[in-house]
Amino acid sequence: MKIDTAEFIISNSDVSKCPKEPLPEYAFIGRSNVGKSSLINMLTNNKNLAKTSSKPGKTQLINHFKINSNWFLVDLPGYGYAKVSKHTKQVFQKFITEYFEKREQLVCAFVLIDIRHEAQKIDLEFINYLGEAEVPFCIIFTKADKISKGKIGQHIAAYKKQLLANNWEEMPPHFVTSSQDGTGRDTLLEYIDEVNQSIFNNTDFV
């Protein structure tokens, strides 16, 4: 897939105010400081599309970007560490779960995980939540340029072991990416394109 246009549409914390257009949506979410904004900018080939920051927890709203005028990329707040009040964090969680459970246009959630670290409890808990809520999702391992290929394989195997131990039948679809050198960009965009084609051929979508 070639991305010709990437346009910011709206930011809000109310799922009912998200765009009404019946276009497929792909939501990106992960722990704070996982490199989400950098990944979004790399995928869209626009370094200024999503705001990046050295401070974790920069994204605090549901951000919709229309891609090629026929699908939405949705940038969601990170879960886990963020320098916000306890009340604010509770609000984050409420509208995040409402988005996943109510948004009919959502066709896939991408859970971002820093490949440098071994399986983290909070990531596993969030993955299990998506499974229980029956939300289609894939895992995107980020920052692949920071460790060796051998370590990448070991850490993915560790996640697979943990998930299988939690009654998952198989490892969810996953991608290995790097915002620095573009690793995984074409593969991920091809996956989105394939899903979009199957949806556009299905007149019953939304």
Image (spheres, helix red, strand yellow):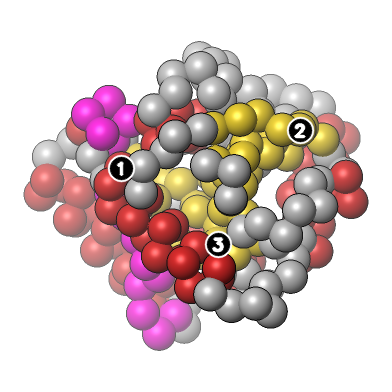
Determine the CA span between mark 3 and mark 2. Answer: 19 Å
Kind of residue at badge 1: Arg
Residue 169 is situated, as x and y percent measured from the top left of the image, at 40, 85
In primary-sequence order, the first of circles 1 and 3 is 3
Q: Is residue 46 above or below residue 137?
A: above
Q: Which residue is mark 3?
A: 108
Which of the two residues, 88 or 180, is positioned nearer the viewer here?
180
Q: Quadrant of residue 100?
A: bottom right
Determine the CA span between mark 2 and mark 1. Answer: 25 Å
| Residue shown at the point (37%, 60%) measured from the top left | 191
Residue 87 is situated, as x and y percent measured from the top left of the image, at 87, 35
Question: Which range is magenta?
Answer: 168-182
Q: Which residue is mark 1?
A: 185
| Residue shown at the point (33%, 30%) measured from the top left | 179
Dot 1 alpha-carbon crowd within 10 angstroms: few under 14, some 14 to 19, many 20 or more: many
In primary-sequence order, the first of circles 3 and 2 is 2
Mark 3 secondary-structure assignment: strand
Mark 2 secondary-structure assignment: strand
